[in-house]
Image (cartoon, helix red, strand yellow):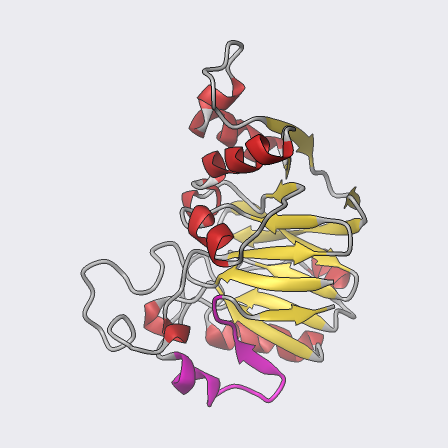
Amino acid sequence: MKITFLGTGTSQGVPVIACNCAVCMSDNEKDKRLRSSILIESEETKIVIDTGPDFRQQMLRENVQQLDAVVFTHEHKDHVAGLDDVRAFNFKQQKDMDIYATLHVQNALKREFYYAFADKKYPGVPLLKLNTISDKTFKVGDVTLLPIDVWHFKMPVKAFRIKNFTYITDANRIEEEEIKKIEGSEIIVINALRKEEHMSHFNLKQALDLLDRLKPKQAYLTHISHLMGKHKDVLSELPDYVTIAYDGQCFTI
């Protein structure tokens, strides 16, 4: 199974509009970050976790020709804003797009994309089939996902475990019962916004402390702000088993 980082940036992306800091002015392509999302590809199934504002650009860059489902972690704009563009897959595949989300996130989608859920739909709107995520494992094609509850300040967010891989975005606290669901993961992707503390995201030290406890074989940091520093500089500060992810990077599980 192949995992591709579609985006590794925080809500504003990197570079940030009108910012002239060293990171935003960097010529290194690894310092240019679209909003956070991943593509999961098995032999039979392709899934995107979160459709941020850059979804269209990400699909074009990775030449994605098929998409079976979208799975949402939570309802913040930088994770849902690109949902309208799944209609390209509606047209090509001639079917509704399966959407997996909690009831809370579904209600937010119905507000944000009200026209897609109208009784009388305007021609060309995205066609969406809602599927409800609970705390139980669920399958999308041949991919089994285990939801994990994490906290983004006071907002509940879903992380997901697939086999020996766990994906955690937009979190700053995980309760002990949920950490048990992550234990034993050989590969962990976790948000690490910046070096300074933040009210709703793990900072670099907090992410590394949690990884030290969980001890995966490989870890990737994502949801990176321009305040973290340049990719190559941060990379040199990390333990051998931890790397700072970049857009387009792939690995297999």
Give the side of residue 82 with respect to residue 179, left or right. left
Give the x, y percent position of residue 95: 65, 28
Reply above or below: 201 against 245.
above
Stretch of the chain drawn in magenta: 231-247
Give the side of residue 249 with respect to residue 82, left or right. right
Foreground of the two, 143 or 66: 66
Is 245 within the magenta?
yes
Foreground of the two, 186 or 41: 41
Reply above or below: 110 against 5.
above
* Image quadrant where one finds the C terminus: bottom right
Foreground of the two, 120 or 91: 91
Q: Residue 169 is drawn in which quadrant?
A: bottom right
* Image quadrant where one finds the N terminus: bottom right
Query: Quick check: can you spot residue 169?
Result: yes
Residue found at x 27% / y 70%: 24
Is 229 within the magenta?
no
Give the side of residue 107 with respect to residue 216, left or right. left
Query: Quick check: can you spot residue 195?
Result: no
Give the x, y percent position of residue 234: 43, 83
Residue found at x 54% / y 44%: 74
Residue found at x 51% / y 36%: 88
Give the x, y percent position of residue 145: 75, 50
Reply above or below: 36 against 185.
above
Count of all numbered marks drawn on residues in the image: 0
Give the x, y percent position of residue 125: 48, 24
Q: Residue 213 is drawn in which quadrant?
A: bottom right
